Amino acid sequence: MSEKKHRVSRRQFLNYTLTGVGGFMAAGMLMPMVRFALDPVLRPISTQDLVQVKKVDELTEEPQRVDFKIQQVDAWYESEEARSAWVYKEGETIVALSPVCKHLGCTVNWNSDPGNPEKFFCPCHYGLYDKDGTNVPGTPPLAPLDHYQYQVKDGWLYLGGARPKEA
């Protein structure tokens, strides 16, 4: 009698089999999709390579705008992004500043405001920065311009990523 209580009917067997096979097939289809969605999140963040931008002997004490392009990877999308920097020599030291204003992200220009000569000027909200990138007190920017990492190799200036100015 106990055998009859534990017997599986044909209907139950078919139900269990179809549920198991369906679950196995669903997992087989979902796993690649989950992997595809999570792979960029789990990938380690790569550092930006240095990019050759200008000959060092062409640099002067007057800031010059230098435009260059970097290879950028954004999740699955690889692209080339245009960047620029204000570069000049201060004695033997090279200074490379980001042109992005720390107030609202507008682009600053060197010596473009007649009322404030020898300063970086942001036309969006009249922000001012000194030549070394320090924000002028009493103007909208609350932080100095970011500095690019740089390296000199074979007479060329190479720029990396921009970082906040170290105090």
Image: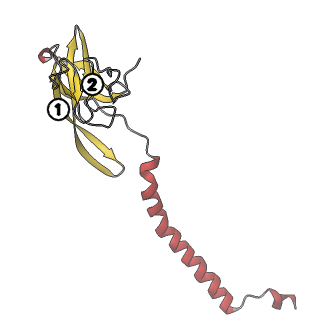
Q: Residue farthest to the top?
A: 91
Q: Which residue is mark 1?
A: 67
Which quarter of the image is occupied by the C terminus?
A: top left
x then y, percent, for residue 76:
34, 52
Secondary structure of the residue carrying numbered label 2: strand
Q: Nearer the viewer, mark 1 or mark 2?
A: 2
- Check residue 167 in the rendering and tell me which mark sits there, or answer none: none
Q: First in sequence, mark 1 or 2: give its number.
A: 1
In the displayed structure, would residue 13 be above or below residue 100? below
The figure's colour scheme reads: secondary structure
x then y, percent, for residue 13:
66, 86
Q: Quadrant of residue 156?
A: top left
Q: Amino acid at mark 2?
A: Leu
Q: Quadrant of residue 153?
A: top left
Q: CA distance from mark 1 to mark 2?
A: 22 Å
Q: Residue farthest to the right?
A: 1
In front: 14, or 55? 55
x then y, percent, for residue 30:
48, 67
Q: Which residue is mark 2?
A: 128
Which quarter of the image is occupied by the N terminus?
A: bottom right
